[in-house]
């Protein structure tokens, strides 16, 4: 690993840094050092760009500090450790803490860099067996466990009919997880063609929300009953259908959706087609409630801003729904999935569609943010 140096001779590394809404840069920053007795320094060999990162740049998850290094998915090699047995980063009552996120989540600098400081390393690093490749391991760092957790939240049972909202990378692995947890039929709902093709390759039935009203399509396919379970994998950046019957149906909700956008994204910096907040923050949650059967189950793993307060609670209670939501509890979910991959029973690597050197990180973000066809999952390589 070659280091640059600053004027005082301190080592510098490349890192993808958040400077403001719509403003990310690949900077040379001081390489991290041990700060607490519970830290480790990790040399990053692979990091990945996640849809979660986009919310911070579009402004739909507020509270970012300028200078925060982005990224919470990575594989690497421990270079240096300290020692401590304190496990919880923000105290026993804290919410989700993650790398490269807004201030209330830590903040802790992220992993889209050459090196990273890992606080509470004994409790946050997971050892990777020698026969698991970095490309398989990178999808175990967040995406696959999150998708599996979503299927668990939805309480998938043998033979269930399941709708997955969002066929990005989390939705794709939610389809795979639902089948492996026993689902009988799975529908995938999205508006991006290459995502729908990938879902079809996994034997999901596909619904393009720009062609069909997804709620009506699911009701038609289930004889008016709805699906047993829904996995919601879209979150706060949900988009209104651009055309088709669903576009007409939701035209009357423009004011409500606009108010939600104002609530969740107080600061934005739209540049042409980039960094545009989703224009229907509560829509996928709405679809989930409308298309699930009475007594159905919904698992919500989409990222929602704490500032969003819209949810169709009346419909949910009147349908006797079970609703579970959250950010993945990686410590409890990842270990058995790692066994699955190490045993050769599931191969996540083919879901990675782009490998880019970290020098191309900003361009990769721009393509992913625009939902360019074929940009399902980008892995950044260093060195
Ligand atoms: Zn992620």
Image (tube, helix red, strand yellow):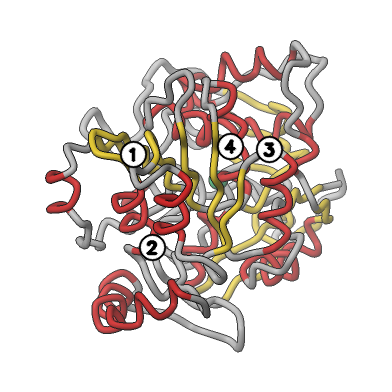
Mark 4 Cα within 10 Å, few/some/many (few <14, many 20+)?
Answer: many
Give the residue number, with chain letter if any, for mark 2. Answer: 61
- Estimate the spatial distance between the alpha carbons at disc 3 and disc 1, rounded to whole Å: 21 Å
Which residue is disc 1 drawn over? 298
Which residue is located at x 24 percent, y 77 percent?
256
The disc, 3 or 2, on the residue closer to the chain's N-terminal end is 2
Element carrying mark 3: loop
Ligand 1 shows up in the quarter that is: top right
Residue drawn where x is 60% and y is 21% of the image: 126
Q: Quadrant of residue 264?
A: bottom left
Q: CA distance from mark 4 to mark 3?
A: 9 Å
Secondary structure state at the residue bearing disc 4: helix
Residue at image coords 60%, 71%: 24
Residue 229: x %, y % from top left: 39, 35
Report the Cα–Cα distance between label 3 and label 2.
Answer: 34 Å
Would you call the spot at circle 1 few (<14 residues within 10 Å), some (14-19), or many (20 or more)? many
The residue at which mark 4 appears reads as: 175
Camera-side mark, 4 or 3: 3
Separation (CA) of disc 1 from disc 2: 23 Å
Left or right position of 176 against 104: right
Left or right: 359, with 78 as reference point:
right
Instruction: Kindly tell me whether mark 4's CB lies below 8 Å from ligand 1.
Output: no
In this rendered view, identify the residue nearer to me: 173 or 118. Answer: 173
| Residue 125 position by quadrant | top right
Earlier-in-chain disc, 1 versus 4: 4
**Distance from the alpha carbon under mark 1 to that under mark 4:** 14 Å
According to the picture, the residue beneath numbered tag 3 turns out to be 203
Is the N terminus in the top left, top right, bottom left or bottom right quadrant?
A: top right
Q: Relative to residue 33, is residue 245 drawn left or right?
A: left
């Amino acid at each position: 690993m070659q280091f640059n140096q600053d004027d005082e001779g301190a080592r510098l590394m490349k890192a993808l840094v958040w400077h403001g809404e719509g403003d990310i840069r690949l900077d040379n920053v001081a390489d991290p050092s041990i700060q607490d007795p519970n830290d480790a320094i990790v040399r990053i060999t692979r990091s990945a760009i996640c849809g979660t990162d986009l919310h911070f740049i579009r402004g739909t998850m507020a509270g970012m500090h300028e200078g925060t290094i982005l990224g919470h998915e990575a594989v690497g090699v421990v270079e240096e450790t300290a020692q401590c047995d304190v496990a919880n980063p923000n105290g026993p009552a804290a919410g989700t803490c993650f790398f490269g996120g807004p201030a209330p989540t830590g903040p802790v600098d992220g992993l889209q860099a050459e090196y990273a400081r890992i606080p509470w390393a004994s409790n946050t690093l997971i050892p990777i067996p020698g026969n698991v490749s970095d490309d398989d391991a990178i999808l175990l760092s967040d995406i696959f466990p999150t998708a599996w957790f979503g299927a668990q939240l939805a309480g998938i049972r043998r033979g269930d009919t399941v709708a997955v909202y969002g066929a990005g990378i989390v939705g794709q692995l939610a389809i795979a997880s639902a089948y492996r947890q026993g689902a009988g039929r799975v529908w995938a709902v999205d508006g991006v063609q290459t995502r729908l093709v990938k879902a079809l390759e996994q034997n999901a039935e596909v619904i393009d929300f720009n062609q069909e009203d997804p709620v009506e399509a699911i009701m038609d396919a289930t004889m008016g009953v709805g699906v047993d379970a829904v996995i919601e994998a879209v979150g706060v950046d949900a988009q209104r259908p651009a055309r088709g019957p669903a576009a007409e149906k939701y035209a009357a909700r423009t004011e409500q959706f606009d108010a939600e956008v104002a609530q969740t994204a107080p600061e934005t910096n739209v540049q042409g087609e980039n960094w545009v907040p989703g224009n229907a923050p509560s829509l996928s949650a709405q679809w989930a409630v409308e298309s699930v059967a009475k007594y159905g189950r919904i698992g919500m793993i989409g990222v929602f801003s704490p500032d969003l307060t819209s949810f169709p609670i009346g419909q949910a209670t009147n349908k006797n729904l079970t609703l579970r939501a959250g950010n993945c509890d990686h410590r409890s979910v990842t270990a058995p999935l790692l066994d699955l991959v190490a045993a050769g029973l599931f191969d996540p690597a083919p879901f990675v569609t782009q490998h880019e050197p970290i020098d191309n990180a900003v361009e990769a973000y721009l393509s992913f943010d625009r939902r360019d066809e074929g940009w399902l999952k980008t892995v950044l390589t260093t060195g």
